[in-house]
Image (cartoon, rainbow, N blue to C red):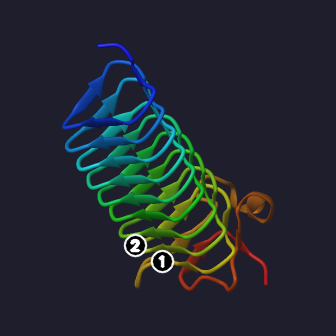
Amino acid sequence: GRSLQAGGGIRAGKLEVGEDIQSGGAIFCDELLKAGGQIKAAWSVEVQGDIRAEELRTGWELCCTGDVDIKSSAQIDREIDVQGAMRCGKGLRAGGTIAVQGLLDVGHGIACNDHIECGNHIQAGWGIKALGDIRAACSIRSGETLQADGEIAAGEGYGVFAGMNVQMQAWPDCAWVRALKKPSGLVSGFWEE
């Protein structure tokens, strides 16, 4: 009903807590990991089902075979591997690769220190920034800026959209697109050679 705090790791079939979950190690669940508040693990979080929480923070990687639904922000210090969809009401930050098979939908911004790879659409209300490539099987949509140190590539027949939430005259300042080369299928946003 309330909070669960463990100095070490947590292993459970199904874990549901009304408030916060805090682990000094890793969290492993066979089914569902759900918290009414924050989930915080010093190491990794691995779930063979869905994850639902207000906020999520891991010191290592996040692995989930189902959907991840975070009402606020998620900060993962290493890689993210989600087989379903991943939704964050606010920001998403990852120290490694973000790999999501379903829809990747973030209310604010996405920041990644490696590649972003998605088997569906990538959409963010603010900006998207990756130190590697940004690749999606469908479209890539950002409300403001779109930046990759590598390439930006949407799926065949899909577009790349920046500045979806910005007036067109403000695109040079608030909706620029930067990558190694101009993304094919760039529909909106400011590209400068």
Which quadrant of the view contains residue 143?
Answer: bottom right
> Left or right: 36 with respect to 15?
right
Residue carrying label 1: 154
Above or below — where is 180 with respect to 31? below
Residue carrying label 2: 138
Looking at the image, do the residues carrying marks 1 and 2 touch, with CB atoms under 8 Å apart? yes
Query: For numbered disc 1, what is the local secondary structure?
Result: loop
Query: For numbered disc 2, what is the local secondary structure?
Result: loop
Q: Position of residue 67 (x, y in %)?
A: 30, 49
Q: Which residue is the extreme one toward the front?
A: 8
Mark 1 Cα within 10 Å, few/some/many (few <14, many 20+)?
Answer: many
Tag 2: residue type?
A: Cys
User: Which of the pair 76/122 is nearer the observer?
Assistant: 76
Above or below — where is 147 with respect to 38? below
Tag 1: residue type?
A: Ala
User: Which of the pair 187/37 is nearer the observer?
Assistant: 37
How far, Cα to Cα, is label 1 from label 2? 6 Å
Q: Position of residue 166 (x, y in %)?
A: 67, 54
Q: Residue drawn at (60%, 50%), measured in percent from left and top?
A: 109
Q: Residue drawn at (80%, 60%), measured in percent from left and top?
A: 173
Which quadrant of the view contains residue 184?
Answer: bottom right
> Left or right: 101 with respect to 43?
left
Q: Residue drawn at (48%, 77%), measured in percent from left and top?
A: 154
